[in-house]
Image (spheres, helix red, strand yellow):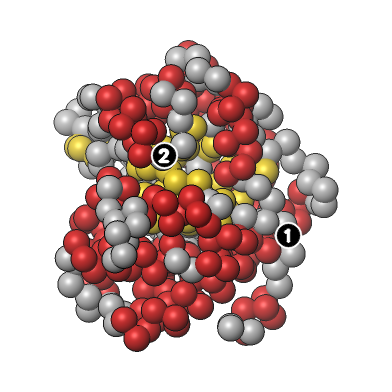
Amino acid sequence: MNLADLNKVALAMVTPGKGILAADESSGTIKKRFDAIKVESTEENRRDYREMLFRSTEAMSKYVSGVILYDETIWQNAKDGTPLVKLIEQSGAIPGIKVDEGTQALPQCPGELVTVGLDKLAERLKKYYERGARFAKWRAVIDIGAGIPSMTAISVNAHALARYAALCQAAQIVPIVEPEVLMDGDHDIDRCYDVTQRVLNETFQELRVQRVELEGMVLKPNMAVSGKKCAKQASAEEVAEKTVRLLKACVPAAVPGIAFLSGGQSDEDATAHLNAMNRIGGLPSSLPWRLTFSYGRALQAAPQKAWSGKAENIAAGQRAFTHRARMNALASKGEWETGLEKKVA
Ligand code: 13P
């Protein structure tokens, strides 16, 4: 392992003014997204849609540091035969790959899940590196509800995250470590804070035990937010203040950067929250790590709608993507304002 090179890639992924496009929806998830815009989820439509994003020259070259791909996409070619990975590289962004294989029920913990995919991971990483991937992602899912999460679910998921991260670094690939505490449910922001704190503490404990080099990874956490069904929704300032406090308590300064997931927040909330956190950090930031985005839904909902599967809408889809990427890029520097949202290109 060359830690200096891993650190260089990790820092590039969290370059101020840029963030990560999470375009790694599994076949099941992208079908759900396409169903919502009445587009059939064929291999060709999935390719056309993602090609539209990766050919959004302004967004990709100015605001996107890296793209997380799904296995199908990393092997796909654009309509003209150029590998999609090459389109990403040509734009100056770094290709990455989702390597977990989804979740399975934890038999001893009803209603809870563990993320799987460690078998043969070392061999798969080698092939992804050859294809151009320089970072990877593994998502653990922790749900909040009556009596959950159990310590068992937190512990097995943290263990798997650390196993994955160690294998990535051995393959010269930067691991994005993503322990996602879901925002579904009616819990308040303080319950989200407490659960996320337990999850992050356990995750970093496992990373230490398994000798993962913190300088060579990126953390992808949820923010501390109110559950979607909670009657009292925390303000952007409260989300920012509590999330930064939580991260300061749990995330070692050796971690180069934190790239948040959007997790079902509205497009504008995801941007406003990131912006408010970077304002707390001050400019230049007083925080030990860079804070940016690694959004899936909050970057893609608008372009998906604008495109709606029609070739004649490609330019509109690219405009919508560029707008959201720009808004989040500004938020990564604390320079976003709500008034900018009205000036959609
Ligand atoms: P969302 O931003 O839609 O939560 O997706 C990010 C991601 O990569 C989830 O694993």
Judging by the rendered image, the residue that carries numbered circle 2 is: 133
Q: Depth check: 131 or 205 in front?
A: 131
Identify the amino acid type marked 2: Ala
Point 58% across, 21% down: residue = 3
Relative to residue 291, is residue 217 depicted above or below? above
Identify the amino acid type marked 1: Gly
Percent across and percent down for residue 323 are: 56, 74
Judging by the rendered image, the residue that carries numbered circle 1 is: 334
Relative to residue 54, is residue 218 depicted above or below? above
Q: Depth check: 199 or 11 in front?
A: 11
Relative to residue 238, is residue 291 depicted above or below? above
Q: Is residue 234 left or right of residue 174?
A: right
Q: Depth check: 206 or 112 in front?
A: 206
Q: Is residue 73 visible?
A: yes
Q: Is residue 222 visible?
A: no
Q: Is residue 195 left or right of residue 24?
A: right
